[in-house]
Image: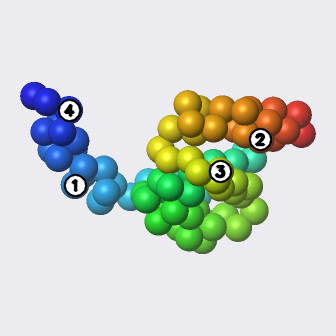
C-alpha cells in the first residue's frame, strides 16, 4: 500500500484512541513539545492540561510535525534544560 492509503486506514483508530487513562498514571515529570503549525498537536494541548496542569508544554514557532528536523536547535535547548532539572 502507498503511504497515503496506510495513513487513511490507520487515522480513524489513531484519532479515536483514548490514552488519557495511561497518562493519568504517570508519576514522572512530563514535557510536551509541539510545533505551532502542527494541527493535531494544538488540538491535544487542552486534553494534556486537563490531565495534569503541571506538565511543561512548549510550542515551537514555525514548526510542524517534526520538531527534531524542523527546529532542532530550539528543541535541543528545551530538552537539555528539562533533563538538567
User: Within the image, what quadrant is residue 57 found in?
Assistant: bottom right
Q: Earlier in the sequence, mark 3 or mark 4?
A: 4
Please give the residue where the numbered disc 3 appears in the rendered image: 60
Helix, strand or loop status at disc 1: helix
Tag in front: 1 or 4: 4
Question: What residue is rendered at 30% in x and 50% in y?
Answer: 14
The residue lying toward the viewer, choosing from 77 and 44, is 77
Color style of the picture: rainbow
Measure the alpha-carbon separation of dots 1 and 4: 15 Å
Residue 43 lies, with reference to residue 58, above or below; the image says: below
Please give the residue where the numbered disc 2 appears in the rendered image: 78
Question: What residue is rendered at 15% in x and 44% in y?
Answer: 9
Residue 45 lies, with reference to residue 72, above or below; the image says: below
Q: Are the two marked residues, 3 and 4, in contact with CB atoms closer than 8 angstroms?
A: no
Tag in front: 2 or 3: 3
Q: Are the two marked residues, 2 and 3, in contact with CB atoms closer than 8 angstroms?
A: no
Measure the alpha-carbon separation of dots 2 and 3: 10 Å
Q: Which corner quadrant holds the C terminus?
A: top right
Q: Are the two marked residues, 2 and 4, in contact with CB atoms closer than 8 angstroms?
A: no
Question: What residue is rendered at 66% in x and 32% in y?
Answer: 72
Helix, strand or loop status at disc 4: helix
Please give the residue where the numbered disc 4 appears in the rendered image: 3
Q: Earlier in the sequence, mark 1 or mark 4?
A: 4
Q: Earlier in the sequence, mark 2 or mark 1?
A: 1
Measure the alpha-carbon separation of dots 2 and 4: 31 Å
Measure the alpha-carbon separation of dots 1 and 3: 27 Å
Image spot of residue 21 (x, y percent):
49, 58
- Image mark for residue 36: none
Please give the residue where the numbered disc 1 appears in the rendered image: 12
Amino acid at each position: 500500500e502507498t503511504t497515503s492509503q496506510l495513513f487513511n486506514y490507520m487515522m480513524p483508530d489513531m484519532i479515536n484512541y483514548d490514552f488519557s487513562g495511561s497518562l493519568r498514571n504517570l508519576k514522572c515529570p512530563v514535557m510536551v513539545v509541539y510545533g505551532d503549525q502542527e494541527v493535531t498537536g494544538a488540538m491535544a494541548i487542552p486534553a494534556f492540561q486537563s490531565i495534569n496542569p503541571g506538565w511543561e508544554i512548549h510550542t515551537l514557532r514555525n514548526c510542524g510535525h517534526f520538531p527534531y528536523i524542523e527546529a532542532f536547535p530550539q528543541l535541543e535547548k528545551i530538552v537539555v534544560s528539562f533533563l538538567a532539572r
